[in-house]
Amino acid sequence: MLIADASGQIIAANQAAATVFRIPADQLVGSPIERLVPTGFRADHGRHVETFFRAMAPRIMGLGREVRAVDGDGREFPVEIGLSPVATSAGKYVVAAVVDITQRKKRERESTLARLVQEAMLPKIPTDLPGLEVAARSDPADATGGDFYDLLRFDDGRTGFIIGDASGHGFAAALVTAAARSYMRALLRTQADIGVVMRMANALLVDDVTDNRFVTLLVTLVDPATRRLTYAGAGHAAYVCDASGNLRVVLDDTGPPLGWFPDANYPTTEIGLEPGDLLLLLTDGIEEAFDPDGQQFGRQRVIDVLRRTHDQPVAGIVEAIHEAVRDFHGATSPHDDATVLVARIE
């Protein structure tokens, strides 16, 4: 908090101002306010002071542009400044509430970078997959998480689906997700056994991941010609529902999350599919969504949506699940990204 007079001289400063500007409070008092303005902005500052004292109305300084200050060490940093006029018998003054927003700006930059990384990992779903109708969408939360999905086409007609979620939020989670996706893509092109692929990816991530981060992930290989599905899960589950939307099989995880245990194994499981079956892959931002009363969305609500929408195109099913989760949230902001992929067996 700073108080300055109409000439732009600081007449009072609290200890918080001294901390923000790295200048003792008694040295701030008596200084021109321009001392705290970066060199490139000082020429126009006097005019802004005059304009403020003519209007004498509370306002936020520099709306629509970045406002910067300079401290006693010459470091420039972004700030938010609220200006409040005070008129007394001794004269006119302005009370300036200054907030250092360096950390907020850093988080915003990291969030933007994380969003760009995350969006790059969400492929366009092809419409010409033989024997399959597929749709997917990921809705980001305010704090970017580590959700991703992927689709791979193989020369023998099989299609691979991957869904994953790195622990934590922000840029670090996005980088872990990018590493996991890259390893899985590369290994699946060279190794037919997805259990071996998972073991190899896990070993690589154990060496890469720090700060106790991990990745939950599930990979499925669907052969439309034989209607067989092979899968392995690392702390991540999925579902197969029949043509009416009723739950047929839970694809339970077959091993721990990637990045935890160097010697973890990931056994594969194979199941048969029927025409009209729906393969549902989703991240925990769906089932673990909370309503304003703290209740979770849960598996049963997901299945209820499938029963209502089973005869729609899969894009409509995906949208219906996301819409149901948004309605369930109500005014509560989502705490995690929500990702859904649905594939119908034709």
Image (cartoon, rainbow, N blue to C red):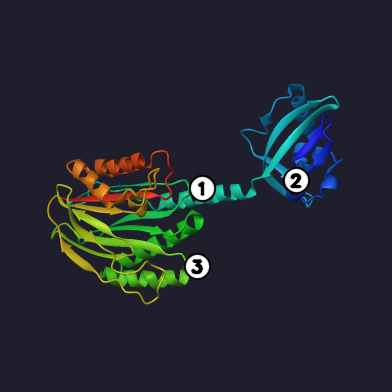
Label 2 packing within 10 angstroms: few (<14), some (14-19), many (20+) = many
Q: In terms of depth relative to the viewer, which is nearer, 247 or 280?
A: 247
Q: Tag 2: residue type?
A: Ala
Number of marks: 3
Q: Which residue lies furthest to the front in this view?
A: 293
Residue occupying the point 29% across, 50% down: 341
Label 3 packing within 10 angstroms: few (<14), some (14-19), many (20+) = few
Residue occupying the point 21% across, 41% down: 309
Q: Can residue 203 be seen in this view?
A: yes
Q: Do the residues labelled 1 and 3 touch (CB within 8 Å)?
A: no
Q: In this view, does 278 lie above or below 266?
A: above
Q: In terms of depth relative to the viewer, which is nearer, 107 or 18?
A: 18
Residue 35 left/right relative to 245: right
Give the Cα distance between marks 3 and 2. Answer: 37 Å
> Where is mark 1, residue-wise?
112
Q: In terms of depth relative to the viewer, which is nearer, 33 or 291?
A: 291
Q: Tag 3: residue type?
A: Thr
Residue 211 left/right relative to 284: right
Residue occupying the point 69% across, 28% down: 58
Q: Can you tell which quarter of the image residue 153 is in?
A: bottom left
Percent across and percent down for residue 71 are: 76, 48
Residue 17 image label: 2
Percent across and percent down for residue 83 are: 71, 33
Q: Is residue 275 above or below residue 308?
A: below
Percent across and percent down for residue 255 are: 31, 69
- Give the foreground label among 1 and 2: 2
Q: In terms of depth relative to the viewer, which is nearer, 7 or 110?
A: 7
Q: Specify the quadrant that holds the N terminus.
A: top right
Query: Who comes first in sequence, dot 1 or dot 3?
Result: 1
> Where is mark 3, residue-wise?
210
- Give the foreground label among 3 and 2: 2
